[in-house]
Image (spheres, coloured by chain):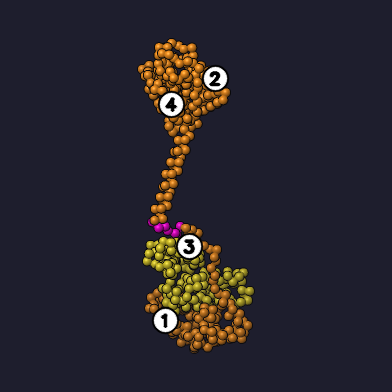
Amino acid sequence: MNINHQNYECFLTDYLDGLLEPEKVAELMAFLAANPDLSAELEQVRTAWKLPISEQAPQDFSHLLKDINRLPISSSNFDELCIACHEGDLDDSQKAKLIAFALEEPKRFERFELFSKLKFTANKQVAYFNKRALKQQSKQAIYLRRSIWTGSAIAASIALMLFLRIQEPAYHSPEIASYQSDSLIKMIASENETLSDDKQANTNKVQQTTRLNPDSDQTEISGDILEIQLAAVDTTENNEEQFIKIARIEPQLLMVKPIQLKESPRKNLESYNEPAEKTIPIVNEIKMKSTGFIAQAENLTINDIIRSGINGINKMAETNIQYEIQTNDEGKITEFALKTDNFNLKRKIRSN
Amino acid sequence: MTVAEYNLCVEKYADSIYRFIVKNLKDTEFSRDIVQETFTKLWLRYTEVSFEKSKSYLFTTAYHTMIDAIRKNKNTQELDQIFQLEHANPGHYSDLKEILDSALDKLPEDQRAVILLRDYEGYSYKEIEDITGLNESQVKVYIYRARKYLMQYIGTMETVL
């Protein structure tokens, strides 16, 4: 590319930066020699650009541009004036002169217009991807937000506990509790654990051996543990009806229903020692005595206890509760079912 | 400024700063980092910076962060402008915008930044002086030189059309 009035400044600054090739340096020197008006500018530029920009004292470079509004318009400074015009550096008078000069030649005017297009416009579709992450919150806002979340969590927990409380089996209700007498007995045993002789029930309760896993799933029985709660027979004279209830076999598995006995109340304690016409058939040595039950079990499995209880209920209440189990190869109960005409409960037992 | 004003600055200027940086660096990930660092610096001093001057503060910080990053990771990409002019082939491009974008990449970083501050944000010479730390005359010279270079890169009007 030949050096001319349109591009000499680029060659000039590269020369001053020491980036110009030797052959181009010679060409530039020849060009400047042929254009004496530019030689003076070279000296000015040489002085101004002697030091790197960053090390220069705050110098005024305006002399390089001269007083643009007073410059006579010519081909040598046409580009510079076009730029000044489109940058808004020309006054109206100089601008009018420039346009008039440009209109003298069509190509010159095209060049003048092309300079106006040498501007960059931002693409508004380009955006920072996550302004939210840049934002900050005041300390008060942070505390308030944390308080709201904490309060909501507490409220939700309370609501959940209340909901679960409402969903608990009916035997926890006062109505059921009122039926329970002092002679309430809990018989709790593991299927694989039998009650030994010395584990005799006292007048009120059997010593518990294990407890139901409180974390067990409502639809499964974890381990081989069941809890059976037999309500005592109400033998008060004012109460002509006797109720036996199965409070629960598994939490929330069964609803408690009072089963009215048709048997008349026992008149004295001694009569309980005698087998009643309708008594719960005892397997081995479960006895029921006095105002409550005395359970004395030996070599019993939980299955035996359950079956005995259900058979007794069927006898006393003339119901037809059917109790069925399924066992695995090891003899462990894997599933049990309680059925009546109006009720059908089947649950699998998971061994821990 | 207040926290609310700071967040308003994020909303108003994050995109502009990002566009300016990414146009200079051509690297989206790096540009995001610079934007994030810029606003972090503002946040650290938000009580000392007034909302009215926040834009200028942000662009100044972003500019210097960008220049520092460029100089730290400077590859030898200071192409000889003359070489580029000789090998420019505007005939490959379909429109002026592509040609300008290509030419912009060839500019030195200072000129490129100054031109983009001028065109993207409409800053005056004085405002660009405040942002870049350059003398106002230097800013003018850079802009003039860049415009002339762009014109030379484009070539003749017939080539563009």
Q: Which residue is mark 3?
A: B11
Residue B15 seen? yes
Query: Residue A240: percent from the left, percent from the top?
Result: 47, 18
Characterize the local packing of mark 1: few (<14), some (14-19) or many (20 or more) Cα atoms within 10 angstroms: few
Tell me the quadrant of the picture where the C terminus of chain A can be found. Answer: top left
Circle 4: residue type? Ser
Q: Which kind of residue does numbered mark 3 sit on? A: Glu
Q: Which mark is residue A320?
A: 2
Q: Earlier in the sequence, mark 2 or mark 4?
A: 4
Residue at mark 3 to residue at mark 2: CA–CA distance: 75 Å
In the rendered image, residue A136 lying in the magenta stretch gets the answer yes
Q: Amino acid at mark 2?
A: Asn
Identify the residue at image location x=62%, y=81%: A107
Q: Earlier in the sequence, mark 2 or mark 1?
A: 1
Provide the residue span drawn in magenta.
A133-139
Q: Which residue is mark 1?
A: A60
Which element type, helix, strand or loop, lies under badge 2?
loop
Q: Residue at x 58, y 70 (%)?
A: B97
At 44% from the left and 77% from the top, the residue drawn is B136
Marks 1/3: CA distance?
38 Å
The residue under label 4 is A178
Dot 4 falls on a residue whose secondary structure is loop
Chain letter of disc 1 in the image = A
The quadrant of the picture occupied by the N terminus of chain A is: bottom right
Q: CA distance from mark 2 to mark 4?
A: 26 Å
The chain that hosts pointer 3 is B
User: Is disc 4 surrounded by few (<14), some (14 to 19) or many (20+) residues within 10 Å?
Assistant: few
- What chain is tagged by disc 2? A
Q: Quadrant of residue A174?
A: top left
Which chain, by letter, is orange?
A
Residue A41 in the image: above or below residue A315 = below
Of residue B96 and residue A333, the one placed in the foreground of this image is A333
